[in-house]
Image: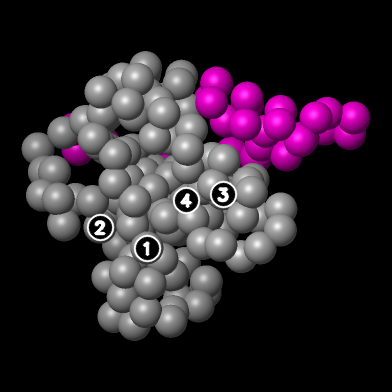
Amino acid sequence: MNILTLDLATTTGWAKKKKKKIESGIVNFSPKRGDSPGIRFLKFRAWLTKVVKDLKPEVIVYERPHHRGGAATEVLVGLSTRVQEIAAEYKIECQAVHSTTLKKFLTGGGRASKEDMIREAKIRFPKQDIVDDNQADALALLAYAIETYEYED
């Protein structure tokens, strides 16, 4: 089964499983100087549409946005609505996972630090070159999706 997982942010972490092959990374949607703030959503939607068309996932799992206040909340909610929109458009199951649930799943504790998450992701996915916490969280979501939803091939 094909799975796509996303740690949503201006720098979004992603991981995908197609059959037995796992890939992951990050992509940055920061607006350039002079761009409208909404450009990040257009860039994200174009990127996600391309990934969905290429991967043809049966499920997209993403980290549920937190209401942190200000611009961060606006960005996270905006990105999550685009995930839901594209999932609906392509008839893909879509699941949001709370960060506390994800941290508890990966580390055993719901208050794990970014460093704890990176360390555990490196243990579970030693072949992935993990560059930051966004990518680590996307891989944690992938492990969660595989185990919790039993999307094994």
Quadrant position of residue 34? top right
Look at mark 1 in the image and give the residue it sits on.
98
Foreground of the two, 40 or 56? 40
Q: Earlier in the sequence, mark 1 or mark 3?
A: 3
Residue at position x 40%, y 26% from top?
Answer: 86
Look at mark 3 in the image and give the residue it sits on.
76
> Which residue sits furthest right?
34
Q: Amino acid at mark 3?
A: Leu
Residue at position x 36%, y 44% from top?
Answer: 5
Instruction: Using the image, tell me which numbered label, if any, was put on residue 144.
Output: 2
Which percent across, then down, holds residue 64?
42, 55
User: Against 89, is 25 above or below?
Assistant: below
> What is the secondary structure assignment of the residue under circle 2?
helix
The answer for how far apart the CA atoms under marks 1 and 3 are is: 13 Å
Q: Amino acid at mark 4?
A: Asp
> Over which residues does the magenta segment extend?
19-47
Q: Amino acid at mark 2?
A: Tyr
Quadrant position of residue 27? top right
The answer for how far apart the CA atoms under marks 4 and 1 are is: 11 Å
Answer yes or no: is residue 129 visible. no
Does the residue at mark 1 contact the one at mark 3 (Cβ under 8 Å)? no
The local crowd at label 2, few if under 14, some if 14 to 19, many if 20 or more residues have their Cα within 10 Å, is many
Look at mark 4 in the image and give the residue it sits on.
7
The answer for how far apart the CA atoms under marks 2 and 3 are is: 21 Å
> What is the secondary structure assignment of the residue under circle 1?
loop
The local crowd at label 1, few if under 14, some if 14 to 19, many if 20 or more residues have their Cα within 10 Å, is few
